[in-house]
Amino acid sequence: MDCIFCKIINKEIKADILYEDNDMIAFSDINPIAKIHVLLVPKKHITSLAQATEANSDLVAKLVLASKKIARKLNIDKSGYRLVTNVGSDAGQVVQHLHWHLIGGESLGPIA
Ligand code: AMP
Ligand code: ZN
C-alpha cells in the first residue's frame, strides 16, 4: 500500500520516533507548525476517524490517552497543548492514515 505512515511503521522510511508499542507509533512531524509537533498514529491502517468503528474504540482511546504520556515526556503537560485529527478534504487531511497531531511548546493562539 502506498501510505507514507505505513512505510514509517514498517521502517521503510525513517522518522524521529518518540514512542512505539504493538498498537501505535509517535514521531515528530516533518513540517512542524509549532516548537513541538508530534504525530500519534495507530499501526493499523484506518483512513481517518470517519472510518473508525466501535471495533476500534479501544485503539482510538489508547491513542488519545497516549497524548498525555507523550506531553509529559516532552514537558508540555503543564504548559498545555492541542490534540487535533483532520478528517477529510475540508479539514485538509493530506495523509490518509488516521493520526492525531500533538502540538505545543509555545502559545498556539486560537484554533482557526
Ligand atoms: P494531515 O494534514 O492531518 O494529513 O497531516 C499530515 C502530516 O504528516 C503533516 O503535518 C505532514 O507534515 C506530516 N508528514 C508527512 N510526511 C511525513 C514524514 N515522512 N514524516 C513525518 N511527518 C510527515
Ligand atoms: Zn497507512
Image (cartoon, helix red, strand yellow):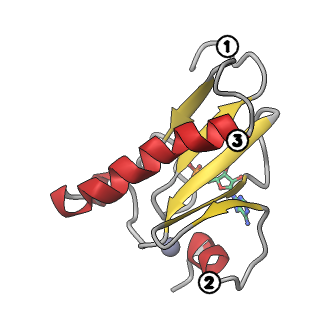
Pair 1/3: label in front: 3
Question: Which residue is rendered at x = 56% and y = 82% of the image?
Answer: 2
Pick the quarter of the image with the C terminus.
Answer: top right
State the residue position of label 1: 109
Q: Which of the numbered marks, if any, corresponds to residue 91? A: none
- Percent x, y for residue 25? 58, 64
**CA distance separating discs 1 and 3:** 23 Å
* Circle 3: residue type: Lys
Residues packed near mark 3 inside 10 Å, few (<14), some (14 to 19) or many (20 plus): few
For the residue pair 37 and 47, the one nearer the viewer reads as 37
Pair 2/3: label in front: 3
Secondary structure of the residue carrying numbered label 2? loop
Q: Which of the numbered marks, if any, corresponds to residue 10? A: 2
**In the rendered image, is residue 86 in sight?**
no
Question: Which residue is rendered at x = 38% and y = 67% of the image?
Answer: 46
Among numbered discs 2 and 3, the one appearing first in the sequence: 2
Residue sticking out furthest to the right: 35
Question: Which residue is rendered at x = 39% and y = 57% of the image?
Answer: 48
- Horizontally, is 51 left or right of 76 in the view? left
**CA distance separating discs 2 and 3:** 24 Å
In the image, residue 6 sits, relative to residue 63, either above or below, namely: below
**In the rendered image, is residue 81 in sight?**
yes
Question: Which residue is rendered at x = 54% and y = 37% of the image?
Answer: 68
For the residue pair 88 and 34, the one nearer the viewer reads as 34
